[in-house]
Image (cartoon, rainbow, N blue to C red):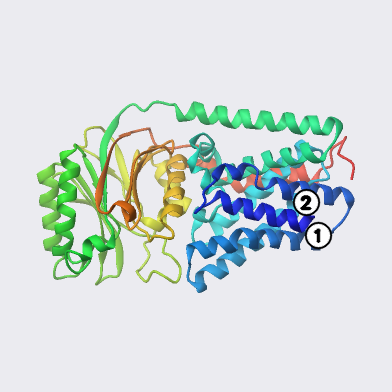
């Protein structure tokens, strides 16, 4: 029964993700396995080895179909799946170990264990960061996303596993323990939803009209060699003009849109400067410096000057060959953008990790531009994950994609405008972006303490035996 429950929970969690994307299943997917672990713990069998095998079944049932959908290269996909399965084994051993406690203590312990392992997965494995998190699908429901402002995606992992532990124990336990588990589930749900609704409704003092322009690779190739400045200007200039005509004061374009060498670097930036002056708008332009092997984004102000240049920091292992940046942030005051604000920039894979995003939040930026280049299999996963950076840092995100989804997301994770270029081709998204003062508890000092909070909860509720503990 334990192995069947493990497989069922793994399949349900996969169905909550793309391509099915029945995301509400994520609220109950783990209940069958947690209930089976509670029964196994009470019965005293199987032992840790049997639980580890069941956890491996769960990991395979969840990750194997996901890898098939993503079509990742073997050298990247298989090691990632194995690493994540090992982490799930650790998680489920800790959850099983916690089930001798009464339901409320068990729920806190199980949630803390899952959150700690989730933090380890998204922080210490430098492949996809939080894009590989099982809570990523909850970007579809902004009220739950607001927990990320307190503790990042691991805070959502805590809430979801604690909630499902209470549901499982309300099924397995009897008498007063069942009543307490059910009551705890209701209280937890009410607290999370209430906090999320209050935070999501907070008004911003100002706004700025922004735009993201994007395209498919084929849109560029139809005009000439992709990346060549003469080709890209034929594609980019009309889109930038359309955005400016709609009133956009900040216009962001995709990652490596322009491929530059020493021969055309100066002339390209001169022409981009003229475009910025003509439209009196900020341009954030993704480009590849081929000579220096650097993936960059230029921030060009309305006078045509390059106000800043950001270099991509996080590269995709085995796939990218440019030189990584040192993590140096850029920060510009959006003079002439229609509202006082400070903006920064990241590039594509950078927004899969919380380190740069948290630092921008600590600096109080109100807007982060993110040039991006995706491909069809990863585009929905990456876009879904990028919304968490806005909530964690407390700022809006303007995301411009090639072969993916361009979008404007506010500081509460709401998508104000979006366009899937894979489906609709080249185009522009424009929105009035509320300018919340950047920064959250997670982007501040509290963010560094997150793993220690989960460790403390695990020790407090897992190692200490409570009076009135549920019998084995």
Looking at the picture, does residue 408 appear above or below residue 313?
A: above
The residue positioned 60% from the left and 44% from the top of the image is 25
Q: Find residue 333 and report its image quarter.
A: top left
Q: Is residue 463 left or right of residue 137?
A: right
Q: In the image, residue 38 lies at what x, y percent?
A: 80, 47
- How far apart are labels 2 and 1 at the CA level? 8 Å
Task: Identify the element where label 1 is drawn.
Answer: helix
Do callouts 2 and 1 mark residues in contact (Cβ within 8 Å)? yes
Residue at screen point 44% across, 72% down: 318
In this rendered view, identify the residue nearer to me: 9 or 104. 9
Q: Identify the residue under disc 2.
A: 96
Q: Split into 4 quadrants, where in the image is the C terminus?
A: top right
Q: Position of residue 391 (x, y in %)?
A: 45, 40
Query: Residue 435 shows which numbered tag?
Result: none
Note whether 25 is above or below 57 in the view shown: above
Disc with the residue nearer the chain's start (2 vs 1): 1
Q: In this rendering, is residue 232 above or below 397?
A: below
Q: Quadrant of the N terminus?
A: bottom right
Name the residue beneath numbered marker 1. 48
Q: Pointer 2: residues within 10 angstroms few (<14), some, or many (20+)? A: many
Residue 76 location (% of width, % of height): 50, 69
């Amino acid at each position: 029964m334990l192995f069947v429950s493990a497989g069922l929970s793994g399949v349900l969690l996969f169905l909550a993700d793309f391509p099915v994307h029945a995301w509400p299943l994520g609220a109950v997917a783990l209940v069958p396995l947690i209930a089976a672990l509670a029964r196994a713990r009470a019965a005293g069998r199987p032992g840790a080895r049997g639980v580890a095998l069941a956890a491996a079944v769960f990991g395979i049932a969840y990750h194997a179909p996901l890898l098939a959908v993503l079509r990742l290269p073997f050298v990247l996909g298989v090691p990632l799946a194995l690493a994540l399965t090992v982490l799930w084994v650790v998680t489920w051993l800790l959850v099983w170990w916690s089930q001798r406690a009464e339901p409320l203590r068990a729920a806190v312990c199980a949630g803390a264990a899952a959150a700690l392992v989730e933090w380890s997965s998204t922080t210490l494995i430098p492949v996809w960061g939080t894009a590989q998190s099982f809570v990523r699908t909850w970007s579809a429901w902004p009220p739950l996303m607001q927990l990320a402002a307190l503790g990042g995606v691991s805070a959502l992992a805590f809430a979801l596993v604690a909630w499902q532990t209470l549901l499982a124990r309300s099924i397995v336990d009897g008498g007063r323990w069942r009543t307490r588990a059910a009551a705890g589930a209701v209280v937890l749900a009410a607290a999370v939803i209430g906090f999320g609704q209050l935070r999501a409704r907070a008004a911003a003092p100002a706004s700025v009209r922004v735009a993201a322009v994007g395209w498919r690779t084929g849109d560029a190739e139809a005009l000439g060699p992709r990346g060549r400045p003469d080709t890209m200007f034929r594609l980019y200039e009309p889109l930038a003009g359309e955005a400016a005509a709609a009133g956009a004061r900040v216009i962001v374009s995709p990652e490596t849109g322009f491929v530059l060498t020493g021969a055309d670097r100066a002339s390209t930036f001169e022409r981009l400067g003229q475009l910025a002056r003509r439209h009196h708008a900020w341009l954030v332009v993704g480009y590849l410096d081929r000579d220096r092997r650097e993936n960059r984004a230029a921030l060009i102000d309305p006078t045509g000057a390059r106000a800043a240049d950001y270099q991509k920091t996080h590269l995709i292992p085995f796939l990218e060959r440019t030189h990584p940046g040192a993590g140096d942030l850029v920060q510009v005051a959006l003079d002439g953008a229609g509202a006082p604000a400070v903006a920064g920039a990241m590039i594509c894979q950078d927004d899969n990790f919380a380190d740069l995003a948290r630092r921008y939040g600590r600096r109080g930026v109100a807007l982060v531009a993110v040039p991006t280049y995706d491909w069809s299999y990863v585009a929905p996963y990456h876009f879904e994950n990028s919304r968490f950076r806005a909530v964690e840092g407390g700022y809006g995100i303007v995301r411009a994609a090639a072969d993916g989804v361009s979008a404007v997301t506010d500081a509460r994770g709401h998508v104000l405008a979006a366009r899937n270029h894979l489906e609709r081709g080249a185009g522009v998204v424009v929105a009035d972006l509320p300018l919340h003062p950047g920064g959250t508890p997670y982007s501040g000092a509290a963010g560094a303490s997150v793993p220690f909070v989960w460790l403390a909860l695990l020790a407090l509720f897992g190692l200490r035996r409570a009076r009135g503990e549920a019998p084995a």
